[in-house]
Amino acid sequence: MVERKKWSENFSEWFNEVIEEAGILDKRYPVKGMNVWLPYGLKIMKNIEKFIHEEMERTGHQEVLFPALIPETEFQKEAEHIAGFEGEVFWVTHAGHEPLDVRLVLRPTSETAMYSMFALWIRSHADLPFKVYQIVNVYRYETKHTRPLIRVREISRFFEAHTAHVDFEDAERQIREDLDIFDNLMKKLAIAYVISKRPEWDKFPGAYYSLGAEVVMPDGRTLQIGTMHNYKQNFAKAYNILYEKEDGTHDYVHQTTFGMSERLLAAVIAIHGDDRGMVLPPTIAPIQVVIVPIPKKGSEEEVYSYAKEIEEELKLAGIRVHLDLRDKRPGWKFYDWELKGVPVRIEVGPRDATEKTVVLARRDKLEKITVSREELVDKIRELFDDIMKYLYERAKEWLESHIKRVDTIEEAKELFNDRRGIVEIPWCGEEECGLRMEEELEAKMLGIPYPDESAKVEGKKCPVCGREAKFIARFARTY
Ligand code: A5A
Ligand code: ZN
């Protein structure tokens, strides 16, 4: 296995450096928590989103685009939702020199923007299920420590799917579909994750229940990279979203949402990275193969024309290839492309040109192989598959070795001191005991393993009250 020293020993510093040096974001923008996306970072993010769009298409969601401003009057219709978000919203109070009659909220998420329109659009059972999504920027005045991609005040790439259904059962089916979509996406990113059902005190404001998908970061803290919420009829009642049933009577729709953001990219960078920088899965790498010519004096022409030939062939094969002709030393170029996470590097020197061979260096394992010119395209395709497998296996191993089940608070504390990620503890199910454990452990309860059946335990005691435990509860220090 590749050594990942600085990556594991000082992850926060590593992450900030890599993001800047690899050309993902510029953090010098003069508003706290808001960053500038740079071309390379944006390309990776858009490649991730391609898979999201594909999944949305596959499952019959339609893309929409709502305004970023929400009138205060709409924002204030669902009581729990307001309570959850009012401390986190940016306000627009003036236009030019005039104060506005109705103040406007910069959307922190789009329930309150969308649902008055849903009430106009949804008429009958024939309109259901109703499934839309958008990828937009949203704004949250985060008070916790802000970090690029992880906790920002302008979430630039906020994905949100919103659905409406005839009944609870159909909304539940939607949640299962969301989990399936999420799983497909994670396979494309080679990321291993866990799903937990949030405790009552930490569900999304206005939700009946919330699911969270977590990954374990290099420093043992977890990052929530996706959520699915079943709202039941909570918002439908507040926004009067009614439909006519087959028998002519009316009822409120059942609703769900599903959200993700640029945290997906944060997870990719963090989980697959190593001391040399990023390691991108070939599925989303803007450049999948980089060709670095290594000419010797007198062989320049031969080497460059051989390199161009290879570039053409890979392009024709549909591989995202780049020929690096910058006036820099090969060693400098290797370093640069390793930092940027390009999955495969091709080195071509005079010997390769005459013998019709190619040297392939894979970024994940930092290994090299020599292949013949004829088998090049096939070998690269094989290598892509192999890199995906290796990255996923390594991510899965990391996750699994960072989930531990214990019986006592002391054992849990020890694991947290050792940065061991997620700790599972028997729990009676009472809020009081859950909050006590959060306090003692200085950690958050992520919730109970989902689906619910996987959270059941027998013959265990809640370490706080000593009563019989009903569930396994997951705790972690979180981002
Ligand atoms: N309406 C629902 C979908 C919603 O807003 N859910 S949410 O609040 O949980 O956000 C969805 C996802 O956005 C989260 O799972 C998390 O991955 C991401 N997210 C939330 N706050 C963020 C922030 N400040 N910076 C970056 N990503 C964030
Ligand atoms: Zn208890």
Image (cartoon, rainbow, N blue to C red):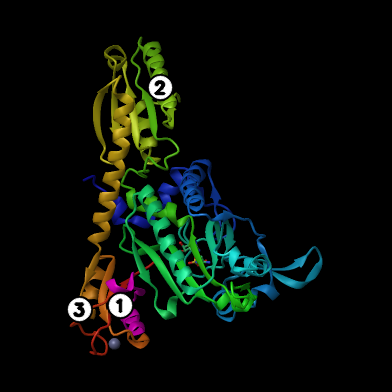
Q: Residue furthest top?
A: 298
Give whichever of discs 2 and 1 has the lower sequence position. 2
Picture quarter with the C terminus: bottom left
Q: Amino acid at mark 2?
A: Glu
Q: Residue furthest right?
A: 98
| Residue 156: percent from left, percent from top | 55, 55
Q: Residue 67's quadrant in the figure?
A: bottom right
Horizontal relation, residue 131 to residue 395: left or right: right
- Whether residue 319 is situated above or below residue 98 in the rendered picture: above
Horizontal relation, residue 81 to residue 470: left or right: right
**Residue designated by label 2:** 313
- Give the CA separation, mark 2 to mark 1: 57 Å
Query: Circle 2 sits in a helix, a strand or a loop, which is it?
Result: helix
| Residue 205: percent from left, percent from top | 52, 75
| Residue 338: percent from left, percent from top | 35, 38
Q: Nearer the viewer, mark 2 or mark 1?
A: 2
**Bounds of the magenta segment:** 434-454
Q: Amino acid at mark 3?
A: Asp
Query: Circle 1 sits in a helix, a strand or a loop, which is it?
Result: helix
Picture disc at residue 407: 3
Proximity of marks 1 and 3: CB atoms separated by less than 8 Å: no
Query: Circle 3 sits in a helix, a strand or a loop, which is it?
Result: loop
Looking at this view, is 173 or 214 the one in front? Answer: 173
Horizontal relation, residue 10 to residue 418: left or right: right
Picture disc at residue 268: none
Give whichever of discs 2 and 3 has the lower sequence position. 2
- Give the CA separation, mark 2 to mark 3: 59 Å
- Whether residue 370 is situated above or below residue 64 in the rendered picture: above
Q: Residue furthest left?
A: 459
Q: Specify few, some or many for label 2: CA neighbours under 10 Å numbering under 14, 14-19, or 20 or more.
A: some
**Residue designated by label 1:** 441
